Image (cartoon, rainbow, N blue to C red):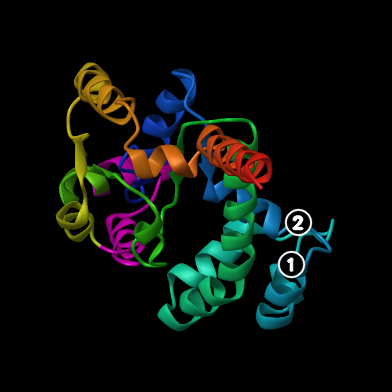
């Protein structure tokens, strides 16, 4: 199985690329979706986050007020680090089980969409790593337009993450999303061809088909040995 890491930054267009993978039949494990489930009312993650940040982050329904929590953590490095620390075990576990589900279905290639791919060291388990990159100017302009933020607020949100230039330097594949959708689609088609190339032997043995092949070889070997004895 080939596990492709996909990351980027806020307002870089990573979600658009993730949706393109889905539209082309590539299974995507989305860490943001898993994170939302982790914070559902009554879950283990919900209990730990509420205990740490207080009930003022809750809506009348007792669900987490995600925009309010976001404002709190984006304005404080210590709170952001605390939130990441509290949620990391639950998100990592959720990602593992989603990957296992895709393995059981026989998927040969999957994409793991993780905003904090490098920060959580999960890039060690993915190959290749795809980074959706834009310039800082483009990032700020898109963020201000999309979320109605002031330049200062947009800059604070962007600076709360590892810089896109740093992520680009660690990438195997870079998608430059400074242009329009047509340019993005052209680059995406090349990336799609790259990740659909035949699996390496190591990737094959990690797939369900490879595991069954190993099981078949071992079983055949045991039967031959039994007959010889």
Against 214, residue 125 (above or below) is below
Q: Is residue 151 left or right of residue 34?
A: left
Decide: marks 2, 1 in contact (CB < 8 A)? Answer: yes
The disc, 2 or 1, on the residue closer to the chain's N-terminal end is 2
**Does residue 78 show up magenta in the picture?**
no
Q: Residue 43 or 57: which is nearer the viewer?
A: 43
Identify the residue at horizontal 48%, vertical 74% (top origin): 80
Image x and y of residue 149, in percent: 38, 51
Q: Say if residue 180 shows up in the picture.
A: yes
x and y percentages locating residue 53 in the rendered image? 66, 79
Taking depth in this image into account, of 27 and 139 the one nearest to the observer is 27
The residue depicted at 33 percent of the width and 65 percent of the height is: 156
Q: Residue at x 64, y 65 (%)?
A: 90
Q: Position of residue 7 (x, y in %)?
A: 35, 48
- The CA distance from mark 2 to mark 1 is 6 Å
Looking at the rendered image, the quarter that the N terminus falls into is top left
* Residue position marked by numbered label 1 in the rendering: 46
Can residue 3 be seen from the camera position used here? Answer: no
Is 161 magenta? The answer is yes
- Give the magenta range: 140-162
Depth check: 179 or 2 in front? 2
Q: Position of residue 216 (x, y in %)?
A: 60, 36
Dot 2 alpha-carbon crowd within 10 angstroms: few under 14, some 14 to 19, many 20 or more: some
Q: Which mark is residue 40?
A: 2
């Amino acid at each position: 199985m080939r596990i492709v890491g996909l990351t980027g930054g806020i307002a870089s267009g990573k979600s658009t690329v993730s949706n393109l993978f889905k539209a082309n039949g590539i299974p995507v494990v989305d860490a943001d979706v898993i994170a939302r489930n982790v914070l559902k009312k009554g879950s283990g993650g919900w209990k730990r986050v509420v205990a740490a940040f207080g009930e003022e982050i809750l809506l009348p329904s007792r669900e987490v007020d995600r925009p309010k929590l976001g404002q709190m953590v984006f304005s404080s490095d210590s709170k952001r680090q605390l939130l990441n620390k509290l949620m990391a075990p639950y998100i990592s576990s959720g990602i593992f089980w989603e990957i296992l589900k895709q393995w059981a279905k026989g998927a040969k290639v999957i994409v793991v969409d993780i905003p904090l791919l490098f920060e959580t060291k999960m890039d060690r388990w993915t190959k290749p790593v795809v980074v959706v990159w834009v310039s800082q100017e483009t990032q700020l302009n898109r963020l201000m337009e999309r979320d109605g933020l002031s330049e200062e607020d947009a800059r604070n949100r962007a600076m709360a993450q590892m810089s896109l230039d740093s992520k680009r330097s660690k990438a195997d594949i870079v998608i430059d999303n400074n242009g329009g959708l047509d340019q993005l689609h052209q680059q995406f088609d090349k990336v799609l061809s790259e990740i659909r190339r035949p699996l390496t032997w190591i990737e094959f043995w990690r797939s369900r088909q490879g595991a069954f092949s190993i099981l078949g070889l071992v079983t055949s070997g045991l039967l031959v040995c039994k007959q010889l004895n």
